[in-house]
Each structure stands twice: as C-alpha cells, then as structure tokens.
Image: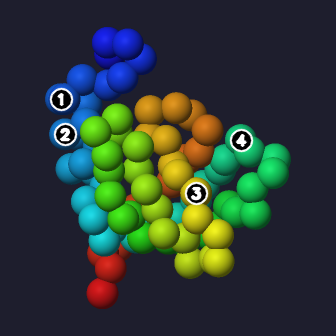
Amino acid sequence: MANNFPDQRTVKQVRKMYPRGTRVELIRMDDPYSLLKPGDKGTVRLVDDTATVFVDWDLPCAILVFALVLTAAVKCFGKKM
C-alpha cells in the first residue's frame, strides 16, 4: 500500500469479491450518525481504483463501504436480478 492507497492486486481482489450487481447485507458499521443498521441490504454499484465499494442501499440513503477500512462489514448474499 503506497501513499495509503491499495496496490493493483488488492483492487483486483476486491473487484472480484464484489462485482457490480452483487447483493450485500450490512453486518456492522462504526458510524453513529448513519441511518443504516445491521441487516440493511444493497447492491454493489462499483469498486473504484482505491478499492472503495460503492453500494446502492435499498433505503433512500446512499453511503460508501470502504473495503479496506474497518468502518463497515458486509456479506454477499446473491446477484442482482
């Protein structure tokens, strides 16, 4: 990790784990101000070049899930229809 950014190998691994359309469920998040709660579900929109996973939550709010920073944990449960 140079300059606090993940290397290309890590980005590739995260993209493989969370391809576009993957359904995810929030397990936990360390943000007391978020409207999201464990059990909320969403769909992966993209993984950018910093391995940040962008999720479109089924709720009317949207946040980022940082795959490399333990501010949130999600689990996959299927593909988008």
Question: Residue at 51% across / 49% down in the picture?
Answer: 65
- Marks 3/4 in contact by CB < 8 Å: the verdict is no
Q: Is residue 18 left or right of residue 32?
A: left
Q: CA distance from mark 1 to mark 4?
A: 27 Å
Question: Residue at 49% across / 41% down in the picture?
Answer: 66
- Marks 2/1 in contact by CB < 8 Å: the verdict is yes
Q: Position of residue 40 (x, y in %)?
A: 62, 69
According to the picture, the residue beneath numbered tag 2 turns out to be: 12
In this rendering, which labeled residue sits more in front, label 3 or label 1? Answer: 3
Give the SS element for disc 1: helix
Q: CA distance from mark 2 to mark 1?
A: 5 Å
Q: CA distance from mark 3 to mark 1?
A: 25 Å
Question: Residue at 32% across / 79% down in the picture?
Answer: 80
In this rendering, which labeled residue sits more in front, label 3 or label 2? Answer: 3
Q: Position of residue 60 (x, y in %)?
A: 65, 77
- Relative to 76, residue 28 above or below: above
Which quarter of the rendering shows the N terminus? Answer: top left
According to the picture, the residue beneath numbered tag 3 turns out to be: 63
Toward which corner of the image does residue 22 lie, by quadrant? bottom left
According to the picture, the residue beneath numbered tag 4 turns out to be: 30
According to the picture, the residue beneath numbered tag 1 turns out to be: 9
- Relative to 24, residue 74 above or below: above
- Marks 3/2 in contact by CB < 8 Å: the verdict is no
